[in-house]
Image (spheres, rainbow, N blue to C red):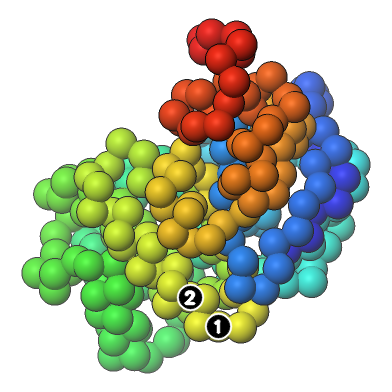
Amino acid sequence: MVVQDLSAQYGTKGRVGGYALRGVSFEVRAGEVLGILGESGGGKSTLARILAGELVRKGPGGHDIRISGGDAFVNGVALRTISQVKRNRLTFHTAYLPQDANDRLERTSTVAELIQQPIFARDKRFDPQSAQNRALTVLDAVGLPLAVMDRYPYELSDGQRQRVAFARSLVLGPNVLIADEPTAGIDVTVRDTVLRVITQLRQDPKFAGIVITHDLAVLRQLGAKVAVVHDGVIVGYGEIAAVFGNPEHAYVRKLARALGLPGLDSNQEPIG
Ligand SMILES: Nc1ncnc2c1ncn2[C@@H]1O[C@H](COP(=O)(O)OP(=O)(O)OP(=O)(O)O)[C@@H](O)[C@H]1O
């Protein structure tokens, strides 16, 4: 994944809004995971949406993101001028776990149906037995018991719903993972699942991942680099120790303190 001087704006009712991202650049090489941190409204989810190929999503709560400068490349595909056909091919290889994934599951479908949906959405005549087998494999990968297959989302806990959303994103066998706060506010065991799944995905030599999280323990275990996004701009980028060790930007200093990272002098401004 390569992001080059990327700027993006939302369009609302035919009008283009302010910049959600401004001149963002980074690279996630094969085998790497990049952790993205930053305060609310900084642009993290916008970046995730763009890289997941969700430039336009219609309907309630929908959005219309325009790449107004630079470009982003996922699996070698340029997103700024992407065609619908290419977009479909791209999203086939991308597991995208949006921020509110557990709430987004359709209430009227069973877990089995939800997990298999991405398969049948692409190929109505896909062999049902093979689809079922794939669903079982990803269900196991996210640590859910077989018994949940016939349940509806409202019969599950938040953590279980998050796992279902995760399983669904994995069912097409992706080589790119974009996870937007996969562990926030959910039971701590989801953390181990995320780590396990990423370890498994990494066996694909082309794998590249982005995880938006403030969970440094997860990022450390993944050996991830980090990018700190503030006000649509990257204000810190690199290895965790280097970014937080001696930060120049005031927001990175503030974040380092909020995360309880040592090695900072005591003359920093207070948090909040
Ligand atoms: N659908 C939308 N339409 C218009 N503007 C939006 C939309 N979604 C986000 N924005 C704007 O884009 C900017 C970046 O928001 P974004 O959601 O990417 O931040 P974030 O860092 O992910 O925050 P959070 O952690 O709260 O999700 C904000 O100014 C926000 O108001």
Q: Nearer the viewer, residue 199 or 99?
A: 199
Q: Is residue 154 left or right of residue 117?
A: left
95 relative to 102, above or below = below
Helix, strand or loop at disc 1? loop
For the point 35% across and 69% down, the residue is 196
Residue 194, image x, y percentages = 37, 60
Residue that carries the numbered disc 2 in the rendered image: 201
User: Which amino acid, by three-letter code, is at mark 1?
Assistant: Asp
Classify 10 Å Cα crowding around label 2: few (below 14), some (14-19), many (20 and above). Answer: many
For the point 26% across and 72% down, the residue is 139
Q: Is residue 16 left or right of residue 176?
A: right
Visible in this render: residue 184? yes
Mark 1 vs ligand 1: CB below 8 Å: no
**Do labels 2 and 1 touch, CB within 8 Å?**
yes
Q: Which mark is residue 155?
A: none
Classify 10 Å Cα crowding around label 1: few (below 14), some (14-19), many (20 and above). Answer: some
For the point 48% across and 54% down, the residue is 220
Residue that carries the numbered disc 1 in the rendered image: 204
Q: Rounded to the nearest whole Å, what is the CA distance between mark 2 and mark 1?
A: 6 Å
User: Which amino acid, by three-letter code, is at mark 2?
Assistant: Leu
Visible in this render: residue 113? no
Residue 127, image x, y percentages = 37, 91
